[in-house]
Image (cartoon, rainbow, N blue to C red):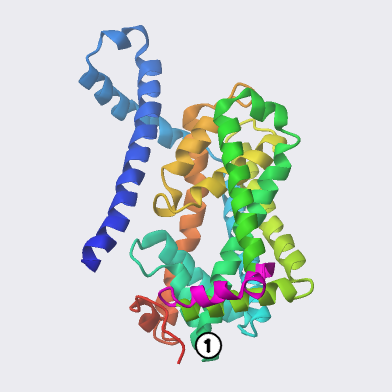
C-alpha cells in the first residue's frame, strides 16, 4: 500500500509535468509551423499540421537557444552558483541559531548534493532529507532541530522572494492591472505572502500554547505530537535571536536580485528587449509559483508562465524566445545539479552520504 501511495504521489506530478510541457511545446510549434507554411496552412489536415509543427518547431527552438551569446550563458551559470552559495550562507545562519555548526566546505558540499537529489530524483528521499539528516549526523544530536533548520531555511527563502515580488508590484502596478496573465499571478503571490507570513509569525513568535494551555496538550495527541511540540519550541529560538531575521532576509533578497540578474543577462544575450523593471516583478513571481510542489523541479509550470507573462504587448517577447529563456535558466540549474552529483560520488563513502540516501525518514531522537 505504501508503494502504491508513493507511486501515486510521484506519478501524478510527472503526468502533469508532461501535460504542461506538451501543451506549451505544441502551442509554440504550431505557431512556428503556421508562420513557416504561410497561407497554405489552413488547407492542411490536422495531422499534417502537427507533423509540420513538430518538424519545423524543434529546429526553430534549437536555433533560437543556440543564438545566446556565450558570455551571457557563462555569466548566467555564475549567477546560479552565487545563489547556491548565498543559500549556503543562510542555512549556516539558521543552523547557528540552533547551536549546530557546519563548516563552509561541509555545508557547501551537502547543499550541492541536495541540489542533485532535488533535480533528478522523484522519490521520497529528496535533498531536504539529505541536508537535515546529515546536519544531525554531523553534530550527533538535535535531530529534530536539524529538520527544523531545513524547514525554516526554505520558509525564509520563499517568504523573502514573495516579499520581493510584492514590493516590485508597486512600480509595475499599471502593467499588472492591464493584463490578466500578470494580474492573476500577482494576486496569487499576495495570497501566498499572506499565508507564509502567518506561518512565519506562528512559528517564530505566536506563544499560543502559553495563552491556551490546552492547545499544547491537544498537540501531543497528534501522531508524533511530541516531535511537533519540540519543533515548535525550536522555532521560537529564531524569533528570539537578535539580528537573525534581518540577516536571513538580507541574504534572501540578494538571492532574488541574483536570479533577476541571471534572467537579465540571458535576455540581453538573446537580444530580447525586457526592461529591468519588468524582470524585477516577473522573475520572483515565476520562481515562487514554480517552487510549489506541483511538478518535478517546476517543469512545465515555469515554461508556461514565462511564455504567458512575456507575451504582453508592453514586453512583446516572442513565444519561442520566452520558452528559450526558461529552458536556458533551467539548464543553468541542471548544470550545478550535475556538479552536485559529482560531489555526491566523492562524498558518499567518505562522509557516509550513501547511508543517508537509503534512509526514508530522519531517525527519531535517541
The residue furthest right is 242
What segment carries the magenta color? 204-224
> Could you tell whether 165 is left or right of 299 in the image?
right
Residue at image coords 46%, 77%:
225
Residue bearing the label numbered 1: 138
Q: Is residue 235 above or below residue 74?
A: below
Where does residue 86 sit, x and y in percent of width and height?
Answer: 65, 65
Q: Which of the two residues, 97 or 271, is positioned nearer the viewer here?
A: 97
Is 86 rendered above or below residue 261?
below
Quarter of the picture containing the N terminus is: bottom left
Instruction: Name the foreground residue: 232 vs 42.
Output: 232
- State whether residue 199 is above or below residue 310: below
Q: Give the residue drawn at x 39%, y 85%.
A: 349
Whether 17 is drawn above or below 100: the answer is: above
Find residue 198 and report its horizontal and vertical position in percent.
Answer: 63, 57
Q: Residues within 10 Å of mark 1 (few under 14, many from 20)?
A: few
The image quarter in which residue 99 lies: bottom right
Q: Residue at x 55, y 89 (%)?
A: 139
Residue drawn where x is 63% and y is 50% of the image: 194
Task: Tell me residue 113's x, y (percent).
Answer: 46, 71
Amino acid at each position: 500500500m505504501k508503494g502504491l501511495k508513493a507511486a501515486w504521489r510521484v506519478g501524478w506530478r510527472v503526468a502533469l509535468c508532461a501535460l504542461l510541457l506538451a501543451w506549451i511545446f505544441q502551442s509554440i510549434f504550431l505557431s512556428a509551423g503556421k508562420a513557416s507554411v504561410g497561407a497554405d496552412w489552413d488547407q492542411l489536415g490536422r495531422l499534417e499540421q502537427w507533423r509540420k509543427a513538430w518538424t519545423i518547431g524543434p529546429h526553430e527552438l534549437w536555433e533560437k537557444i543556440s543564438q545566446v551569446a556565450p558570455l551571457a550563458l557563462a555569466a548566467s551559470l555564475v549567477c546560479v552558483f552565487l545563489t547556491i552559495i548565498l543559500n549556503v550562507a543562510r542555512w549556516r545562519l539558521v543552523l547557528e541559531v540552533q547551536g549546530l555548526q557546519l563548516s563552509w566546505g561541509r555545508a557547501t558540499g551537502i547543499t550541492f548534493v541536495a541540489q542533485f537529489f532535488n533535480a533528478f530524483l522523484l522519490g521520497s528521499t529528496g535533498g531536504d532529507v539529505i541536508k537535515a539528516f546529515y546536519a544531525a549526523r554531523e553534530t550527533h544530536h538535535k535531530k529534530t532541530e536539524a529538520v527544523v533548520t531545513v524547514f525554516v531555511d526554505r520558509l525564509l527563502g520563499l517568504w523573502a522572494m514573495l516579499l520581493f515580488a510584492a514590493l516590485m508590484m508597486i512600480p509595475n502596478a499599471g502593467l499588472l492591472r492591464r493584463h490578466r496573465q500578470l494580474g492573476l499571478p500577482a494576486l496569487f503571490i499576495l495570497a501566498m505572502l499572506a499565508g507564509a507570513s502567518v506561518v512565519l509569525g506562528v512559528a517564530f513568535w505566536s506563544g499560543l500554547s502559553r495563552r491556551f494551555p490546552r492547545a499544547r496538550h491537544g498537540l501531543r495527541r497528534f501522531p508524533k505530537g511530541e516531535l511537533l511540540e519540540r519543533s515548535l519550541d525550536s522555532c521560537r529560538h529564531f524569533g528570539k535571536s537578535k539580528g537573525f531575521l534581518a540577516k536571513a532576509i538580507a541574504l534572501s533578497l540578494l538571492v532574488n536580485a541574483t536570479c533577476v540578474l541571471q534572467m537579465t543577462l540571458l535576455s540581453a544575450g538573446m537580444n530580447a528587449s525586457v526592461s529591468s523593471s519588468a524582470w524585477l516583478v516577473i522573475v520572483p513571481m515565476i520562481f515562487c509559483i514554480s517552487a510549489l510542489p506541483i511538478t518535478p523541479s517546476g517543469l512545465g509550470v515555469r515554461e508556461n508562465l514565462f511564455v504567458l507573462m512575456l507575451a504582453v504587448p508592453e514586453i512583446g517577447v516572442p513565444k519561442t524566445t520566452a520558452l528559450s529563456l526558461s529552458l536556458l535558466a533551467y539548464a543553468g540549474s541542471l548544470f550545478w545539479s550535475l556538479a552536485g552529483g559529482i560531489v555526491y560520488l566523492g562524498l558518499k563513502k567518505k562522509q557516509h552520504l550513501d547511508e543517508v540516501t537509503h534512509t526514508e525518514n530522519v531517525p527519531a531522537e535517541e
